[in-house]
Image (cartoon, rainbow, N blue to C red):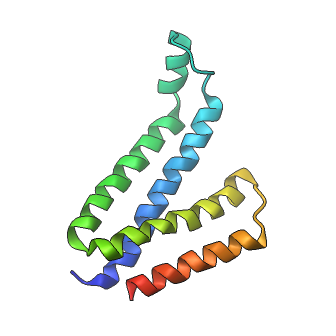
């Protein structure tokens, strides 16, 4: 398999994982506090963000199966770190979290590492 295909597949897989995490955070904010009650479980299962989170995780997992089957593990596994990059961007866009210079430096180092591994 052409190793150049790994990077776009890893980006899509990482985006699915981050989308799942973002949706999970939104879903958890809408759920009632945990209890063994019908009201709690209703707040879980009628929550569209929770369902969408599961779909994203499922699709990301299926794509991950494809990636590790067709690419060297030593190249594929480090690409998972791209989810940290997208997670940081999601934290800014969706949760308005501050991100300092040290975190941006870390993101740049992760991106450089992925570039060198994919080469």
Kindly give the residue lying farthest to the bottom in the view shown: 119
* Residue ID at (32%, 60%): 64
Above or below residue 80? Residue 26 is above
The x, y position of residue 103, in whole percent, is: 70, 69
Image quadrant assignment for residue 43: top right
The reply, left or right, for residue 64 in relation to residue 31 is: left
At x 37% / y 68%, what residue is drawn?
Answer: 77
Above or below 53: residue 33: above
Residue 48 is situated, as x and y percent measured from the top left of the image, at 51, 35
Q: Residue at x 47, y 84 (%)?
A: 115
Q: How many marks?
A: 0
Q: Quadrant of the C terminus?
A: bottom left
> Relative to 101, is 61 on the left or the right?
left
Q: Looking at the rendering, in which quadrant would you find the N terminus?
A: bottom left
Q: Is residue 15 above or below residue 40?
A: below
Q: Residue at x 40, y 77 (%)?
A: 7
User: Residue 44 placed where, x, y %?
Assistant: 51, 25
Position of residue 95 in the picture relative to residue 84 (left or right): right
Extreme residue toward the top, this view: 37
């Amino acid at each position: 398999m052409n190793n150049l295909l790994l990077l776009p597949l890893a980006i899509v897989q990482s985006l699915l994982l981050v989308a799942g995490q973002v949706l999970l955070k939104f879903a958890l904010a809408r759920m009632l506090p945990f209890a063994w009650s019908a009201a709690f479980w209703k707040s879980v299962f009628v929550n569209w963000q929770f369902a969408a989170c599961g779909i994203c995780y499922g699709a990301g997992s299926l794509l991950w199966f494809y990636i590790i089957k067709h690419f060297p593990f030593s190249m594929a596994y480090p690409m998972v770190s791209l989810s940290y990059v997208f997670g940081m961007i999601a934290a800014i866009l969706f949760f308005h979290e501050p991100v300092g210079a040290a975190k941006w430096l870390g993101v740049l180092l992760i991106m450089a590492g992925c570039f060198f591994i994919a080469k």
